[in-house]
Amino acid sequence: MRIEDLRPAPGSTKKRKRVGRGPGSGHGKTSGKGHKGQKARAGGGVRPGFEGGQMPLFRRLPKRGFLPYGGKTEFAIVNIRDLSARFVAGSVVDPESLVTSGLIRKSGRGAVKVLGDGDVAHALTVRVHKVSEAAKQKLEAAGGRVEPLPAKSRGLASDRRAAELPEHLQGSGASSAASS
């Protein structure tokens, strides 16, 4: 077989629709745009949601709800009843081990919360982002430990502001201007 013998599989390619090429093509004259009107013009058409001047649906419906700046944090929820069933005594429970045990999805590793539904039978070391008070009390009563993980940063402006300023930008503006 040579390079010039190669062909695409039958039916995998399609000829381009060439409009405005005469009446015999079936797409001549108005090029499939019909007669006149806003949609037939060059650059014509209306924006999404426009209903010809009638009050559009998105403006007729009431505004509802609120989302905080930066969005909501969706936690992967795990109950201590499930931890007790899946982990042996003395084991460390962290997001990775929860994924391998099938309690949470891989995408939920960034924010995990343990709730206090059920009872824990043995001591466990739990390293997750949040733990409810009830879960914490039950885990510690069974001889376990709770070690909170830091929340993952989303790179928000507030996080950047919290970072320390470089040395040449520290100090007040007046004293730095006087020294230079």
Image: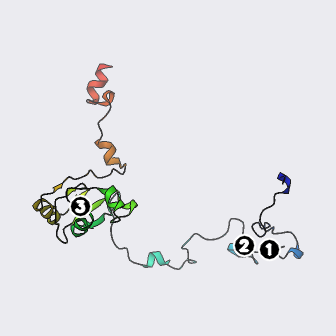
Q: What element carries label 3?
A: loop
x and y percent of residue 146 in the render? 18, 55
Between 178 and 136, which is closer to the camera in this rendering? 136
Between the C-alphas of marks 2 and 3, the distance is 70 Å
Kindly identify the residue that appears in the image at 10 percent across and 62 percent down.
141
Q: What residue type is disc 3 on?
A: Val
Label 2 or label 1, whichever comes before in sequence order:
1
Q: Do the residues labelled 2 and 1 touch (CB within 8 Å)?
A: yes
Q: Is residue 160 left or right of residue 136?
A: right
Quadrant assignment, res 169: top left
The reply to whether residue 94 is visible in this rendering is yes
Q: What residue type is disc 2 on?
A: Ala
Q: 10 Å neighbourhood of mark 3: few (<14), some, or many (≥20)?
A: few
x and y percent of residue 119 in the render? 16, 70
Seen as rendered, the residue at the extreme front is 88
Identify the image quadrant of the N terminus.
Answer: bottom right
* Residue denoted by label 2: 40
Quadrant assignment, res 127: bottom left
Label 1 or label 3, whichever comes before in sequence order:
1
Point out the frontmost of discs 2 and 3. Answer: 3
Badge number at residue 88: 3
Between 37 and 80, which is closer to the camera in this rendering? 80
Between the C-alphas of marks 1 and 3, the distance is 74 Å
Seen as rendered, the residue at the extreme top is 179
Q: What residue type is disc 1 on?
A: Thr
Between 19 and 175, which is closer to the camera in this rendering? 19
The reply to whether residue 71 is visible in this rendering is no
Q: Is residue 161 left or right of residue 27?
A: left
* Residue 12 position (above or below residue 125): below
* Residue denoted by label 1: 30
Q: Are marks 2 and 3 in contact (CB under 8 Å)?
A: no
Identify the image quadrant of the C terminus.
Answer: top left
